Amino acid sequence: MEDLLKQIKDYKDEIAAYAANGEKSAEEFRIKWLGTKGLVKNLMIEMKNVPAEKKKEFGQILNEFKQFTEAKYEELKSSTSNLKPQASNLDLTLPGNSIPVGTRHPISLMANRIISIFQRLGFAVAEGPEIEDDWHNFTALNLPEHHPARDMQDTFYVQHLATGGTDWLLRTHTSNIQIREMQKGKLPIRIICPGRVYRNETVSARSHCFFHQVEGLYIDENVSFADLKQTLYFFAKEMYGQDVKIRFRPSYFPFTEPSAEMDISCMLCKGAGCNVCKKTGWLEILGSGMVHPNVLSNCGIDPNKYTGFAFGMGIERPALLKYGINDIRLFSENDVRFLKQFTSAV
């Protein structure tokens, strides 16, 4: 018992000299002395070796030692808590930490602007799959198999795992959405179809193997080419300004007849001629035309009762012009330095 009393005295001296310098050291003290395998617990176990006549006296000494150790631990906790800033010491008038402002991608900014203009004319937004079958992407659009116009679009075909066939592909335009909407048979139809499309082209500063389009479709009774022109005139004026000059040129698309391409006066040289407009003073911005009767028939719509127009444009070209970007590859490289420039863009 004398050895135990001497050990308790040594423990007290060690505890009294202990100084915590943080929450971690206070917790280390608790584990060492008051934990389930701590030294105080070990001393309690030694009670079984104390003679019966001495147990009461030794028990009082142990209780006093335990209380001494617990008091030291509370003192250590209190001293470490004083190191923390108190709520009453906080100055809520000080400015907080600045948070970086997020950005929208320039393609998203341009797409949203185009969509908003057509929504004001009553067009609803429709979406469809990017992996499409041959019927919706080509055949229903008056492009039967082996039609030479299919060569106008270099296509990524997808081999079907079950059949081994290549009737599936990455859509080359968002016209597949128009076909799916027409097949629903809910007339009239007035939609725009934004989305990503894919073509097997060489990636360069002016072209990419994937890009974005917005296509439009309006089908109802007595829809005329004049309706198409006035719709696109309104879009061009809202998009490029009231002073922009506009012209239509005859063109060919298998799914529209008659067909036309729409040009605007070059925004960079004001029509004088530059490298961007190839010295012509004009920039092509979209293709359009009256929906071909064969396309209507393929989708179960009576071409003798209903007519309609369609148009389509890329999103990258207007974005290049608006933001003065000279390389289309920048849109897909995810360079934060490039994207940060559009923080304040609307």
Image (cartoon, rainbow, N blue to C red):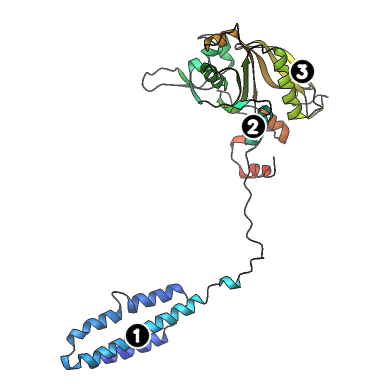
Q: Tell me which corner region of the image, top left, top right, bottom left or bottom right, holds residue 213.
A: top right
The Cα atoms of the two marked residues, 1 and 3, are separated by 95 Å
Q: Nearer the viewer, mark 1 or mark 2?
A: 1
Q: Which residue is mark 1?
A: 67
The image shows residue 241 at horizontal and vertical percentages of 78, 29
166 or 204: nearer the viewer: 166
Name the residue beneath numbered marker 3.
Answer: 247
Instruction: Compute the Cα span from label 1 to label 2.
Output: 73 Å
Residue located 48% across and 79% down the image:
79
Which quadrant holds the N terminus?
bottom left
Type of the residue with mark 2: Ala
Q: Amino acid at mark 3?
A: Arg
For label 1, count other residues whose C-alpha is less than 10 Å away and answer few (under 14), some (14-19) or many (20+).
few
Secondary structure, mark 3, is: strand
Q: How many angstroms separate mark 2 from mark 3 (CA)? A: 23 Å
Name the amino acid type tagged 1: Gln
26 over 203 or under it: above or below: below
Residue linked to disc 2 = 111
Q: Which residue is more in the foreground, 304 or 77?
A: 304
Asked which quadrant contains residue 323, the reply is top right
